[in-house]
Amino acid sequence: MGRYRIVARLGAGGMGRVYLGRSPGGRAVAVKVVRPELADDGDFRRRFAREVAAARRVNGVFTAGVVDADPDGSPAWLATAYVPGVPLGDAVAAHGPWPEGSVLALGAGLAEALEAIHAAEVVHRDLKPSNILLAPDGPRVIDFGISVTGKASALTRTGVVVGTPGFMSPEQLTGKPVGPASDVFSLGAVLAFTATGAGPFGTGSAHALSFRVVYEEPDLRRLPPDVRDLVAECLAKEPGGRPTVPMLLDRLARATGGVPAVNFAPSQAGWLPEPVAAAVHTRIATQPSPEPSARVVPPRPGEWPDGDRPPSVDAAGGPTGPSRRRTLLGVGAGVAGLGFGGWSIYDNRSSATRRREADSGERRWRFQVGGLVYASPAVADGLVYISSSRNLCAVDTDTGELRWKRPRAGVGYSSPVATRGTVLLSSIDENLYALDGATGKEQWKFILGSVGSQSPTEAGGVVYIGGENGNLHALDIIDGSEKWHFFAGGVVASSPTVADAVVYFGSYHSLFAVDAATGEQQWKATTDGNVFTRPAVVDGVVYVGSEGGTLLAVDAVTGERRWKTAVGSVVSLSLTVSDGVIYAGSDDGNLYAVDAATGKQRWKFPIGRRTLSSPTVFDGVVYVGGGDRHLYAVNSPTGKQRWKFATGGAVYSTPAVTDGAVYVGSEDGYLYAVTR
């Protein structure tokens, strides 16, 4: 494969198969060969090439770096440094929790690895025990595969979450922008696991673990004091509350008295607990050089070599059962950086050396919806749902092909909401419709008695929808039966937001809070103008914009005002809050970034003519549409433009963003899929 002689098969992952290779000079490498069906996908190859380029910039002593690659080859492949180490998860399972000194040494090595990764503007996104190899001279951070759901690769397809429950950060679980602080959270979880033998959020289903990560505090009672304090800071719910990697390195240096935590000769492995060090030495000592007969013929284009099945892999990522092959391979299918599914390019646009992604902002496909498109798309289960003045359509996210369509009767007023396999849409015929997401068949409809003023919201199996007659309704998502309704005294002007069992919504010069279970009013706050923006609720604060040209922050429990700040003109578009910053469009033609704690402006970005869509924030980029027929991508920390994409009409549609694309509608009647 390239200049590397394939000498043994190591295993297989979601993206392809992995082989032990030798360079002409005898260097051992792990060679990953991409599956033919993925290599034939042009989108996959482009993304693969970008992520290979990003990963090649990583150069740290505690990382297993990319040494060579051919993204354009047939088949495509990459080679990483081969580390004959023991996975951390296997070591803890076999030999138990580590002493404090070894945990701190591990933390120092991992922090230094993250420093190198982040310096290359890369975020790992899947730091966990099975992605850490233990070697005599320190740990090695790897990433050994790309998750696949059906035919979808995490590199190029939607609907795939890269990461592992229990070690993923809250922002990663909730779809918020993910930066270096997310890796710090994962590091804290790894250290807690190493010191106790169990993750800090317990065990159970992926849903249970994810819920605890987002909403509950970790169990750190069994950690030694120094480790406990450090881990507690790493596991802060908000990214801004966690220490930076340089801060971690400083803390760890002080905890070890200024002596390098990993400061031993390769033959000693003194940083490891004695049983683990012995296991590592045994692994290395019993690793034979592959005989000529063990040579595996590399695959021809579009084919796979015959040979042994890869070793079976347990939940920790290690092979099950001892064998000569296990001794040879060291870590089974988990060898030294087998792919980039968990790594993403970290967008640090303030750096003058940041590389712009060449094909960002390019059209992947467009679909003619028919009629004018003012609504925003919804993405779920491989489909994009979009409504227009004529139709409601379900379109394949990857190909842009139509799956089903319903005519205008009963559709066309609000944006669709896709949840629990159901598409919800309020309509100009004064009904709320619930449709089967896969087929478009009607499941039920509810008579609102007036035009639904905005899009509905679903939470906990209940659909909340307001109307121009002033009623807010709570409906069962299964059959549409009404649980309660609340009369606001005026138009329910905004889509509702549900947070902590309270429904928040805007009305004429008012912001309401209503008990989600009973419909009883909790409080009502007066605003400077009508509130058409969907309330954003973060950390006990409700943020809205008003027609009075102000942004308002009020206490979520009492309704008392925290602050108010003026922007250029009417704010009738919903706000987005991300990492302590509010992003809001205004009728004055600007996109504003405002500090969520103080209301002070951080930056503003001029949109051609008016800002027409609500902003969407994803991976450090703000996407917003304008009256000048463009979709804009703006760097969230700096307010600098990354790219803009021209459509055939004004963009009122709030962008829907996934790992692979931005979906947005235009007044020209088309739905666009744009490479982000």
Image (spheres, helix red, strand yellow):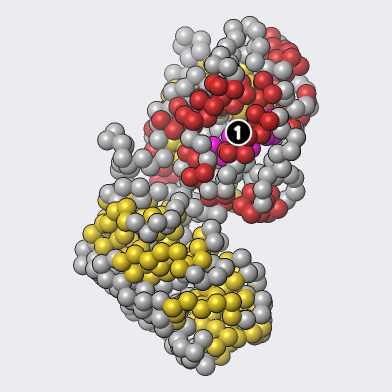
Q: Is label 1 in a helix, a strand or a loop? A: helix
Which segment is the magenta one?
Answer: 184-195
Viewer-proximal residue, 164 or 315? 164
Viewer-proximal residue, 159 or 204? 204
Residue at 50% across, 25% down? 250
Q: Residues within 10 Å of mark 1 (few under 14, many from 20)?
A: many
Residue at 76% across, 16% down? 275
Q: Where is residue 578 in the image (x, y as percent from the top left)?
A: 45, 54
Is residue 305 rendered magenta in the image?
Answer: no
Viewer-proximal residue, 378 or 93? 93
Q: Is residue 569 above or below residue 595?
A: below
Q: Where is residue 647 in the image (x, y as percent from the top left)?
A: 27, 64
Q: Position of residue 549 (x, y in %)?
A: 31, 72
Q: In this view, does 237 lie above or below 673?
A: above
> Which picture quadrant has residue 662?
bottom left
Q: Where is residue 393 in the image (x, y as percent from the top left)?
A: 45, 73
Is residue 194 rendered magenta in the image?
Answer: yes
> Which picture quadrant has residue 373?
bottom left
Question: Main SS of the magenta segment?
Answer: helix
The kind of residue tagged 1 is Leu
Asked if residue 602 lies left or right of residue 93, the reply is: left
Asked if residue 387 lies left or right of residue 98, the reply is: left
- Residue 357 can be seen in this image: yes
Q: Name the residue under label 1.
A: 230
Tag count: 1
> Which picture quadrant has residue 134?
top right
- Residue 413 can be seen in this image: no
Residue at 69% across, 24% down? 100
Residue at 65% across, 7% down? 268
